[in-house]
Image (tube, rainbow, N blue to C red):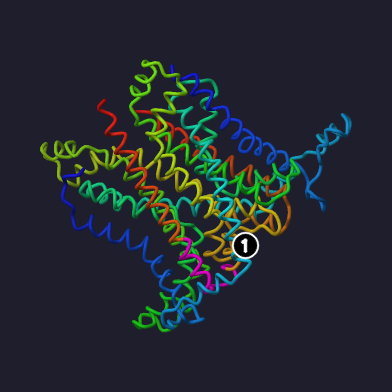
Amino acid sequence: MFTRPARLASIAPLLWMLLFFLVPFGFVVKISLSQAAIAQPPYLPLFDLGAGWEALQAAFAALSLDNFKLLFADDLYWRSYLRSLAVAAAATALLLMIGYPIAYAMARLPRRWQALAMMLVIIPFWTSFLIRIYAWINILQHDGLLNQILLGLHLVSAPVVWLSTDSAMMLGLVYSYLPFMILPLYATLSKIPPSLLEAAQDLGASPRRAFWLVTWPLSLPGIGAGVLLCFIPIVGEFVIPDLLAGSDSMMIGQTLWLEFFTNKDWPVASALAVLLLALLLLPLLAYERLQRRQLEGGR
Amino acid sequence: MGRVRLSRFNIASLAFGLAFLYLPIVILVIYSFNGSRLVTVWGGWSTRWYAEFFNDQAMLAAAWMSFRVALASATAATVIGTLAAVALARGGHFRGRTLFSGMLYAPLVMPEVITGLSLLLLFVALNAERGFWTVTIAHTTLTMCFVAVVVQSRLGALDRSLEEAAMDLGCTPLRAFVAVTLPLIAPAIAAGWMLAFTLSLDDLVIASFTTGPGSATLPIRIYSEVRLGVKPEINAICTLIIAAVTLLIIVASLASKLSNARADSAAPM
C-alpha cells in the first residue's frame, strides 16, 4: 500500500537522470561522429531543426566513423588505452594486496574500536584527491622531505628523482584509492560469523587453512566490489597521472583531456569517451549488479 | 569476528595503513604553518600563508564560487536523491526499475572525464551559458547518487511495520511517510547532504569541463597553481579545506549514529 506513492517519487530523479545522464551520452555519440571545425561550437555538422528536412538529411549524411578509424590508426590512442588498462590492473592488484590485511585487521578489532577505525579510513576518502596528491608532491619533490631524510641518513649521495615517474603515479593511485578498497572488504569481512572459523579449527584446520577455506571464499563479494570500485575509475583517471607521472606516455583520461582542452578537438575527445565507455561496459554492469544486490538483497 | 585476538601481523597492518593514510596529510598541515618562503626549509611557526590566502582575491572568489555551488548542488541532490531512494526502497518492482537503478548507481564509478565531457556537450547543445548553474547541475547529477545510496541503505534497514501501523491507524501514505519515516531517516538525509557538499567542494574534473570563463572553482584554481609548482599558500588553503571536510565528516557520522540509535530504539515496537 506504500508502493504506489513511492513509485511516484521516482519521477523527478528519473527525469533528472534521463536529461543529465543518459541524453548527454547521446550527444557524445553524435559528436564522436562529427568533424572538428574552427567554429563555435567547434564541430560540424550542426543539427538545426529549423533549417528544414533537406538540411537535416545533409547533416546526417555528414556523420562518419572517421574519428574511430583515427583512434585505431594512430598508435598514440591505442597505446593510451593499453597503458590505462595495464596501470589500472597493476594498481588494483597492489591495492588488494595492501588493503586486504588492513581490512582483515579492522574486522578483528573489538566492536567498539571498529567504528573508530572505519571513520579513520573514511575521512581521507572524502578529502579531495587533489589535496592528497598535492601532499605527496610536497614530500616527493626534488628538495622534498623524502630526499632530505634520505640525504640526512646518508642513504643516497644525491637527491633521487621521485616526481614524474611511474612509481610516483602508482604510489598516488594506491594512496588515493585505498579507502575504496578497504571499505567494501571490511564490510564483508566483518559479517563473517566467528563461529564458522571456530568450527573449522575444531575440525582440525590450522588458522592458515581455516583462513583459505572459510574467510577468503566468504570475502569474495567484498573483493569483487573493491576491485571494481578501484579499477573502473582508475582506467579513466586524470589528476593522478597528470600530476605525478612523467609526460612521455599518457593514460586515456589525459589523452581525452588534451584533445578537448588543448587541441580543442571535441569530436576526437568524444570518440575517445565512447570507446572508453565501451571498454568499461562489462565492469560497469558487474558493479551495478553487485551494488543492487548489496542494497536490496538479503534484507 | 569480534572475539578473535589480534595477531602481530594484524596490528602491523593497521598501524601501517593508518600511518600511510595520514602521514602525508599531517606533513602538509605542518608545512602550512612554515614561516619560510621555501616550502622545504623550516623557518619557524607562522600563519603568514593563511594571511596571504585571505588577501588573494582570485583565490577567495574561487572559494566563494565553490561554496555556493556546493551549497546549491548538495541541497538539490539531497531532495532528488532522497526521492530516488524512497522509490527504490519502497516502490517494489516497477517498470523501468533496472534502467532507473542503473542510471543511479553508474555515476558512482563512472570516470569523471566521461561525465564531465557528456554534460558539457549537452550544455553546449542547449546553448546554456556556462558558469554557476552548469557546474551546479553537473554536481547535482554526480552527488545525488551518493545521497540515494546512503538514504536507501538506511530505509532498507528500517522496520516497515512502523509505516504499516501508521496507515492501519488511518494515516494516508504521504502522512505516514512524513510523520513516521522521515524523522527516522532524517539523520541519514543530513549525512547524505554533507557528503554531497564535500564531494562538490572537492571536484576538479567535472567542474573543469562544465564551467565557463571567469567562474573557476577552488579546485580549478588550486590545480592550475599546483601545475606550476608547490607554493606555501596552497598548503594553507588545503589545510583549511581538510579542516572543513573533517568537521563535516564527524558531524555526518554522529548524525548517522544517531539515526541508527533511533531506528534501533523504535524497532522493538
Q: Quadrant of residue A195?
A: top left
In the image, B249 versus A283, the foreground residue is B249
The three-letter code of the residue at mark 1 reads Ala
Q: Circle 1 is placed at which residue position? A: B61
Image location of residue A194, percent across then percent down = 18, 39
The range drawn in magenta is B226-241
What is the quadrant of the N terminus of chain B in the image? top left
**Residue B160: in sight, yes or no?**
yes
* Left or right relative to B159: residue B56: right
Q: Residue at x 46, y 76 (%)?
A: B47
* Left or right relative to A155: residue A269: right
For residue B239: magenta? yes
Mark 1 falls on what kind of element? Answer: helix
The residue carrying pointer 1 sits among few (fewer than 14), some (14 to 19) or many (20 or more) residues within 10 Å by Cα, namely: some
In the image, A11 versus A76, the foreground residue is A11
Q: Quadrant of residue B54?
A: bottom right
Q: Is residue A121 above or below residue B189?
A: below
* Left or right relative to A141: residue A189: left
**Residue A91: in sight, yes or no?**
no
What is the quadrant of the C terminus of chain B in the image? top left
Q: Is residue B169 above or below residue A84?
A: above
For residue B57: magenta? no
- What subunit carries mark 1? B
Q: Residue at x 41, y 49 (%)?
A: A180
